[in-house]
């Protein structure tokens, strides 16, 4: 994905500058269009080519112990605002190892904040212990992130 460390460093710097000038208030919970704008064509093109041989394996989300993913939902509970590190992270079955390693490096660089993850863990635990229905858990996940994004804009 990157030809050398200098090219990678330059790309990371550009993304940081755009993040700080445009998306810092709602980061890391970006919509698909915000994510595409922030990371640009190069990374989006690579991500679109990555597909897991184990369709819907969930390992990508489980590998990083995502507080918004539950096997009971079969996907991210806040899909419209899926966190940046979750959008970037892929298991090694998704593509060539060198590309996955570059993507995982970006994940590490851009995953220093998760926002309201502690509240999300409570929702996930209540879902998995069947104290919440799937529909109610999805609703609470969405409300949590929408409140985070709205509060951040104030």
Image (spheres, rainbow, N blue to C red):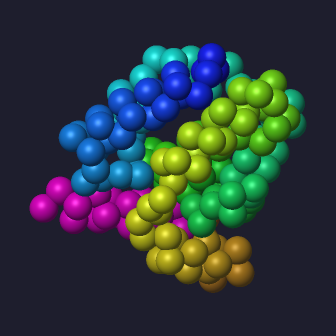
**Residue 6, percent from left and from top:** 52, 25
**In the rendered view, does 96 fall on the left or right side of 20?**
right
Is 97 above or below relative to 3? below
In-front residue for pair 148/100: 100
Looking at the rendered image, the quarter that the C terminus falls into is bottom left
Looking at the rendered image, the quarter that the N terminus falls into is top right
Confirm whether residue 139 shows in the render: no
**In the rendered view, does 102 fall on the left or right side of 35?**
right
Question: How many discs mark residues in the rendered view?
Answer: 0
Q: Is residue 22 magenta?
A: no
For residue 144, which quarter of the picture?
A: bottom left
* Highlighted magenta segment, given as a residue range: 136-154
Confirm whether residue 57 shows in the render: yes
Give the prevailing secondary structure in the magenta stretch.
helix
Q: Is residue 150 magenta?
A: yes
**Residue 112, percent from left and from top:** 48, 59
In-front residue for pair 41/2: 2
In-front residue for pair 111/12: 12
Is 9 above or below relative to 149? above
Q: Which residue appears at 56% of the width and 80% of the height?
A: 122
Is 137 above or below relative to 146? below
Q: Which residue appears at 64% of the width and 35% of the height?
A: 103
Residue that lies at the very extreme toward the front in this rendered image: 6
Q: Which residue appears at 78% of the width and 42% of the height?
A: 91
For residue 113, which quarter of the picture?
A: bottom left
**In the rendered view, does 135 fall on the left or right side of 71?**
left
**Residue 94, percent from left and from top:** 78, 31
Q: Which residue appears at 57% of the width and 61% of the height?
A: 68
């Amino acid at each position: 994905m990157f030809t050398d460390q200098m090219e990678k460093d330059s790309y990371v710097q550009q993304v940081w500058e755009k993040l700080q000038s445009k998306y810092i208030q709602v980061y890391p919970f970006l919509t698909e269009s915000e994510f595409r704008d922030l990371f640009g064509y190069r990374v989006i093109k690579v991500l679109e080519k990555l597909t897991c041989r184990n369709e819907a394996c969930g390992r990508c989300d489980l590998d990083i112990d995502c507080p918004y993913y539950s096997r009971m939902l079969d996907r991210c509970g806040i899909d419209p605002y899926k966190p940046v590190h979750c959008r970037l992270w892929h298991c090694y079955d998704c593509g060539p190892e060198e590309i996955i390693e570059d993507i995982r490096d970006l994940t590490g660089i851009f995953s220093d904040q998760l926002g309201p993850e502690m509240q999300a863990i409570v929702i996930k635990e209540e879902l998995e212990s069947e104290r919440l229905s799937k529909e109610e858990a999805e609703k609470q996940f969405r409300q949590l992130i929408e409140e985070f994004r709205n509060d951040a804009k104030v």
